[in-house]
Image (tube, rainbow, N blue to C red):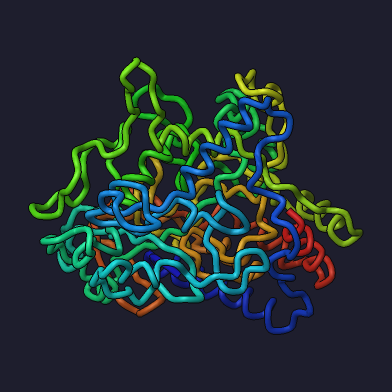
């Protein structure tokens, strides 16, 4: 969909599209769709103590709280919304199939609701227009601009989130005149990269997995990975050099950072981790900063901040429960391993000693190595985060995939088979991306140019996708059935 670099990459995209077209046009195999029935996620980790379960419940309540500008609007008791924002509650975006998950949609078997961002645009008198890429049946999205000035070939990269809405016109924001970004202009110049919410279930286990365990897992099966063109590397903290692992490009170190950044960027709430207000224009600041902080009571006791509670809720949540059991699903699981999918989507990892009951030395099944991999020009978003380049993404964990409604970082498809083939980009020779390179957006045929210096060598998944394409229809269906059982 995004960023075709040069003739070699363009021809690779055509080749990949031919494979996809051939596979889909004559296939009997279909995506079974989101799994119905219980969510199998959203609850506390099994085995927690009574106190830990109470902490989980308190964190969940904060996670579901709805924010307004100063906490004065009926039904919106949280404080600090805006001046710019994408949502007014964590659970608004992280809703499917339960609080803590990912984007909801009307076709969900568990949470059949329209994209909440549509109604949010004009809530409480706000005067926002709904951007064209936000639709009732589409995914919750955030928008990043790739270049600072898409009309300037020498423009530096941007990469930051530009919030969809502002508090202008809201009844609790008198006098604020902050305008929305001009998304029409940015879209016309191919300068927008989308992201959808990542599920938060079970991430305390990921946080407590030692760097050494991740490194050993990435180093395993080296010959097989090399023969399939799979490499991978970790994004790391610029401060202490340890592995970062949260976010689409594994750019965040901890769940506290992950929650604090999201609270500030998505809801506009300044907090202990990100204490400075975004879009702090005159006439639009109504609270002291940070708006969310640990409160010290008269006797010296403290009330934890929202961000602390969010992180605790995520940290203590259970991983999704798979339902793999039928012969087709079990055959699909075996094929998933044999064709090479499991070399990046690692089935098992083990935690270190944990302060939480039952989480020590616990083997869990995320179906991710949490490493960065080159995914080629077709998936490249032109955004650099930490050490991750424009076409690098963290291996998306597949646990819980059975009930997801949208796939890939930008939610471009709801069809699992389409998402699988989108991993392929037969670009062939490596291409150096410089500030003179053009990135094209297949959604509207527009072109922008941006400063960049990195290498695109096609997708590391190419050989695995070729293996998948060679399977007969029943085998491909088995893999789809297995994935929808996760």
Please determine whether, in this image, residue 232 is positioned above or below residue 237: below
Task: Answer left or right for 289 relative to 267.
Answer: left
State which quadrant residue 294 falls in: top left
- Above or below, 440 against 96 in this view is below
Please give the count of numbered marks on the rendered protein. Answer: 0
Residue at 72 percent of width and 63 percent of height: 468
Residue 302: where, in percent of width, then height? 38, 22
Residue name at image x 70 percent, y 22 percent = 361
- The picture places residue 48, in percent across and down from the top left corner, at 68, 28
Pick whichever, 246 or 197, lies toward us.
Answer: 197
Give the residue furthest to the left.
282
Between 437 and 318, the residue placed more toward the observer is 318
Relative placement, left or right, of 125 versus 468 is: left
Q: Position of residue 430 (x, y in %)?
A: 43, 55
Q: State the residue at coordinates (60%, 44%).
A: 201
Residue 68 position by quadrant: bottom left
In the current view of this chain or complex, which residue is farthest to the top? Answer: 300
Position of residue 187 in the picture relative to residue 34 (left or right): left
Q: Is residue 392 visible?
A: no
Q: Which residue reaches farthest right?
A: 327
Image coordinates of residue 93 in percent, x first then y, are 47, 57
User: In which quadrant of the rendered image does the N terminus lie?
Assistant: bottom left
Q: Is residue 318 visible?
A: yes
Q: Quadrant of residue 287?
A: top left
Q: Nearer the viewer, residue 38 or 3?
A: 38
């Amino acid at each position: 969909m995004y960023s075709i670099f040069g003739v070699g990459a363009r021809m690779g995209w055509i080749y990949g599209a031919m494979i996809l077209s051939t596979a889909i046009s004559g296939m009997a195999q279909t995506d079974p769709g989101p799994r119905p029935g219980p969510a199998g996620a959203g609850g506390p980790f099994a085995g927690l103590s009574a106190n830990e379960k109470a902490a989980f419940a308190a964190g969940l309540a904060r996670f579901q709280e709805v924010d307004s500008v100063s906490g004065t609007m009926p039904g919106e008791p949280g404080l600090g919304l805006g001046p710019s924002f994408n949502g007014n509650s964590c659970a608004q975006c992280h809703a499917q199939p339960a609080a803590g998950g990912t984007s909801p949609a009307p076709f969900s078997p568990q949470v059949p609701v329209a994209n909440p961002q549509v109604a949010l645009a004009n809530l409480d008198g706000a005067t926002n227009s709904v951007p064209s890429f936000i639709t009732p049946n589409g995914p919750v999205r955030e928008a990043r601009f790739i270049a600072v000035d898409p009309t300037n070939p020498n423009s530096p990269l941007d990469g930051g989130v530009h919030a969809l809405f502002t508090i202008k016109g809201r009844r609790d924001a008198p006098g604020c005149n902050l305008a929305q970004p001009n998304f029409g202009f940015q879209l016309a110049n191919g300068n927008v990269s989308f992201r959808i919410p990542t599920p938060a279930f079970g991430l305390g286990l990921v946080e407590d997995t030692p760097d050494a365990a991740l490194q050993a897992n990435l180093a395993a099966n080296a010959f097989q990975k090399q023969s399939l063109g799979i490499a991978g590397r970790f994004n790391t903290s610029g401060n202490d050099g340890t592995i970062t692992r949260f976010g689409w490009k594994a750019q965040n170190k901890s769940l506290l950072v992950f929650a604090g950044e999201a609270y500030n960027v998505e809801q506009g709430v300044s907090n202990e981790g990100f204490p400075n207000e975004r879009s702090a224009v005159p006439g639009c600041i109504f609270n002291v900063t940070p708006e969310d902080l640990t409160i010290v009571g008269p006797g010296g006791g403290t009330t934890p901040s929202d961000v602390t509670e969010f992180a605790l809720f995520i940290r203590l949540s259970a991983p999704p429960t798979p339902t793999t059991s039928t012969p087709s699903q079990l055959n699909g699981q075996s094929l998933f391993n044999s064709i090479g999918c499991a070399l990046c989507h690692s089935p098992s990892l083990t935690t270190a000693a944990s302060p939480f009951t039952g989480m020590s030395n616990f083997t869990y099944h995320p179906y991710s190595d949490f490493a960065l991999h080159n995914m080629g020009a077709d998936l490249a978003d032109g955004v650099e985060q930490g050490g991750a380049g424009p076409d690098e993404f963290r291996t998306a964990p597949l646990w819980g995939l059975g009930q997801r409604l949208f796939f890939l970082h930008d939610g471009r498809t709801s069809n699992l088979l389409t998402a699988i083939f989108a991993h392929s980009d037969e670009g062939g020779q490596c291409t150096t991306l410089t500030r003179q390179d053009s990135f094209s957006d297949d959604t509207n045929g527009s072109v922008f140019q941006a400063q960049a210096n990195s290498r695109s060598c096609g997708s590391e998944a190419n050989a695995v996708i070729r293996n998948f394409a060679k399977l007969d229809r029943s085998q491909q269906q088995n893999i789809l059935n297995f994935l929808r059982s996760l």
